[in-house]
Image (cartoon, grey):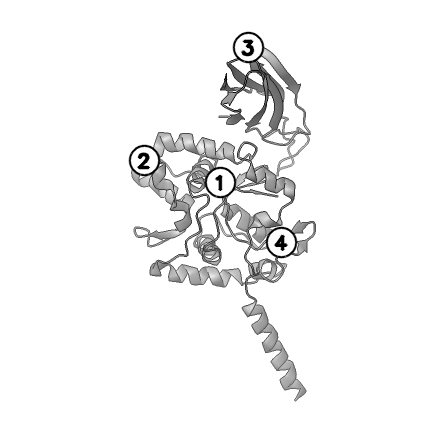
Amino acid sequence: MARAILTVPAKARVGEVVEVRALIQHPMETGYRSDAAGQRLPSDLVRRVECRFDGELVLAGELHAAIAANPYLAFALRVPHNGTLSVTWQGDRGFTHTESARIDVT
Amino acid sequence: MSGWLVRCGLVGGALCAALAAAAEPRQSGVEFMSPATQALQRDDAANPAFLWVKGGAQRFEAACARCHSVADMRGVATRYPAWDGALGKPVTLSARINLCQERHVDAAPLAAESEALLELESFVAHQSRGLPIAAPSDPKLARALQLGAKLYVQRMGQLDFSCAQCHDAHAGRRLAGSTIPQAHPTGYPIYRLEWQSVGSLQRRLRQCQSGVRAEPYSYASDELTALELYLNQRAAGMIIETPAVRP
């Protein structure tokens, strides 16, 4: 079971730019390595990350083999109103994980 | 006369090697890391070891919360390895978690270095972050402490090195590209960048053993437990950082 940690400030002023930080547990196996028996390890990567604020896409990115295991992503987000930020990671072998956090404006 | 001098020199050298004291002042491995790695450890939202702590919190809630509260876990990691009366020997924190599994949860013990065991150990040890490591005070631990102290200075492997030769005599100097730390186990289980994963102190000790080309002691062996115990005595009073990041 994948673990993920999404860190956002619980409160923000209207229109404030806040920092969003997302961390997910994933081996990010490149597909270029071999195991102890010499067998090629098949690639197992997170391929795409999507961040939505109340359903609206605010950031999307593609991840590749050069990114370390347990990828960490930080970005700035302007918060116009109360809402829920959700981050979805999708990858090989049907991997998908969504983590959500509520941000309230004052 | 010259023979006497040579013999005296040899004896003196051996004494020096035996008495080489731990490096002073004592410093956690965090002091030897790059600023970027230090920053990674400092920031709970970026430190990847928190993924294991989070997993451990869920497992604790599911399996351990029947008997233990999270608050009860504060300070536990400062006291391990500790004496287990039923087994009649000291056990490490991860071994203690496994004994709990067997005795009270009625579950099969978790495999060494399994995700489940590392997560639980990370979570429990994290509850002691900021507390000083307690010096082992139980008199029943004396024998194991003695064994640990002996193993620490015992040369082993094809390279014929002891722990003390690197971590006492050459701490702070470099072994190839890496700085040799003083070997104080302040942050275990650690997220090691080289592993890209969390691992236990025993995994680290075994890796040092294969580094000097010795046959590693097996997980949960009396030898590794004794070494852990001795390292805790050596680091007594130092502050627990779990979950730490190391290069």
Look at discs 3 and 4 and give the one toward the viewer: 3
Q: CA distance from mark 2 to mark 1?
A: 20 Å
Look at discs 3 and 2 and give the one toward the viewer: 3
Q: CA distance from mark 3 to mark 2?
A: 42 Å
Q: Give me the chain letter of mark 1.
A: B
The circle drawn on residue B180 is: 4
Report the residue marked by disc 3: A55
Look at discs 1 and 4 and give the one toward the viewer: 4
Q: How packed is label 4: few (under 14 Cα within 10 Å), some, or many (20 or more)?
A: some
Look at discs 1 and 3 and give the one toward the viewer: 3
Q: CA distance from mark 1 to mark 4?
A: 24 Å
Report the residue marked by disc 2: B105
Q: Secondary structure at mark 1?
A: loop
Report the residue marked by disc 1: B113
Circle 1: residue type: Glu
Circle 2: residue type: Val
Look at discs 2 and 4 and give the one toward the viewer: 4
Quarter of the figure with the N terminus of chain B:
bottom right
Q: Position of residue B213 (x, y in %)?
A: 61, 54
Q: Earlier in the sequence, mark 2 or mark 1?
A: 2
Dot 1 and dot 3 residues touching (CB under 8 Å): no
When asked about the image quadrant of residue B11, the answer is bottom right
Q: Give me the chain letter of mark 4.
A: B
Q: Secondary structure at mark 3?
A: loop
Q: CA distance from mark 2 to mark 4?
A: 41 Å
- In the image, B47: left or right of B126? right
Q: Position of residue B162 (x, y in %)?
A: 57, 61
